[in-house]
Every structure is written in C-alpha cells, then in structure tokens.
Image: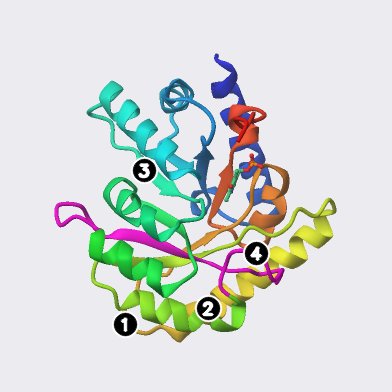
Amino acid sequence: MTTIANNLQQVMGRIAQACQAAGRDPAQVGLLAVSKTFGADAVLEAVAAGQHAFGENYIQEGVDKIAAVRAALPDVALQWHCIGPIQSNKTRLVAEHFDWVHTVDRLKIAERLSAQRPDHLSPLQICIQVNIDGGPTKSGVAPAEALDLVRAVAKLPRLVVRGLMSIPDHAPELEAQLAIHTSARRLFDQISAVGEPGLGQFDTLSLGMTADLEAAIQAGSTLVRVGTGIFGGRTYPAA
Ligand SMILES: *Cc1c(COP(=O)(O)O)cnc(C)c1O
C-alpha cells in the first residue's frame, strides 16, 4: 500500500471513531482531500485508493492540476472544491473549473461566479465562509450577516447555496476546538431553520482539518478538509 493510501485509511479510521464517539452515522461525514502544493501524481494515488473529492487553495495551481488529472483519468468523475481566497480577477477560472466553492464571503464574488458559470456545467455548489471567531483581519462574513448573504446568494441563478464553512484559528485543546466549532454549528442550525425557497439543499457544514477533525465531527461537521493527514507536510514555494 502506498503512503497516501495508508494515510487515507488512517484518516477514515479517525472519522469513523469520531462518529462513533459522537453517535453519528459515518455516512454523514464526507472527506475532502486537500491537495494544495502537491502534484497531480499525489491526487492520482489518492484516487487509486478510492478518494474522489479534492480541495485546492491556489486557483491557478488548482486549475492546472484539474487539467492534468482529467487528462490522466478522462473517465473518472472527481469533485473539485475551491477552498482558498478568491480575488475578483480569478472568479472566471473558478466558475469554469471547480464544482464547489467554500470561500464565498461577499455578494460581489458570488455574483461574478454566477454570471461566469458556463451553461454546459451544473450550478456551482457554494458554502458561505463565516468568520466564526471574529478576528477583524480574517476572511469570512460576520456571523450576524451570514443569513443575509445566504439569502442573497440563494437568489443567484447559477449557484446553489449548500451551507457554511469556517477556518477557526488553531486551538490546541479539544475543549476550545469544540466550543468554536459548536458556534458554527449553531449558526448553521439557525439558518437551516429559516427554511425559505432557495435553501432546500442547505446541508453542508465544512468544518475541521487534520488537527481538529474529532472536535469538528463532534460539533456536527458534514465535511472535513484534510491535507497534512493524507499527503504529509507541505513545503510552500518561496514567494
Ligand atoms: C490547507 C487547508 C486545509 C487542510 O489543512 P491540514 O491542516 O493540512 O489538514 C483545510 N482547509 C483549508 C481552508 C485549508 O487552507
């Protein structure tokens, strides 16, 4: 078994155990393999081990990798999620190449993604990024403004609003991780309870990474985003 296949198996084991501890069905928790900084070869290895959903942070890197993987596996359907910050001048690439976007925190970006989504592709699946722990310089909409943004995005014709995503600051203790993920869960429940047209598929809570997936699953995450635990440590290219 390759290292990636072995790592994937371990991560799946952690997810299963966390679900059992939380009394949740493991079928309710998806795994997004975060392949940023790793090459198409690493993705192909993960696909061979059964993984089908991948997350990318850097738009151009992601687009190049999607093309390389598609060329190698033209008949395999994979899901590509954009989980990095999106500048206005990159919305077209995202709309043309990705299936999901987790990082919408402004209406202007959502409007561009909707307008630029090609007709031959199914609607882009959107999570609204929430700045749940409130740092003033962090990405994400303020929790108090999340519902308004969800409603506005739900009206855009080529987007489907699927849920919320957050990237809290790293907390070493399980209790602190759980507290912050639980605030995201509460906001998700409040918005779900509104139940208006356009929110019929509001079912995704994208929470948790390698270091805190247990707390995220206990809090109610439906999609954990794991990079290091699958692909190993990252080396960032010098700027
Ligand atoms: C890099 C990244 C991850 C994966 O982080 P790991 O700690 O390597 O699991 C998850 N989500 C986002 C938004 C990221 O940028």
Tell me whether the residue at label 4 lies in contact with that at label 2, contact meaning CB atoms closer than 8 angstroms.
no
Q: Check disc 2 and report the residue beneath it.
A: 146
Q: Which mark is nearer the camera, 1 or 2?
A: 2
Tell me how far mark 1 sits from mark 2, CA to CA: 17 Å
Q: As rendered, which of 87 and 13 lies closer to the eye?
A: 87
- Which comes sooner in the sequence, label 4 or label 3? 3
The part of the chain drawn in magenta is 117-141
Tell me how far mark 3 sits from mark 1, CA to CA: 26 Å
Residue 85: percent from left, percent from top = 51, 55
Circle 3 crowding by C-alpha within 10 Å: few under 14, some 14–19, many from 20: some
Residue 102: percent from left, percent from top = 47, 58
Label 2: state its secondary structure.
helix
Which quadrant of the frame does ligand 1 lie within? top right
Label 3: state its secondary structure.
strand
Tell me whether the residue at label 4 lies in contact with that at label 3, contact meaning CB atoms closer than 8 angstroms.
no
As drawn, the label of residue 172 is none
Label 4: state its secondary structure.
loop
Q: In the rendered image, is residue 199 in sight?
A: no
Q: Check disc 1 and report the residue beneath it.
A: 197
Residue 41: percent from left, percent from top = 44, 20
Residue 221 lies in quadrant:
bottom right
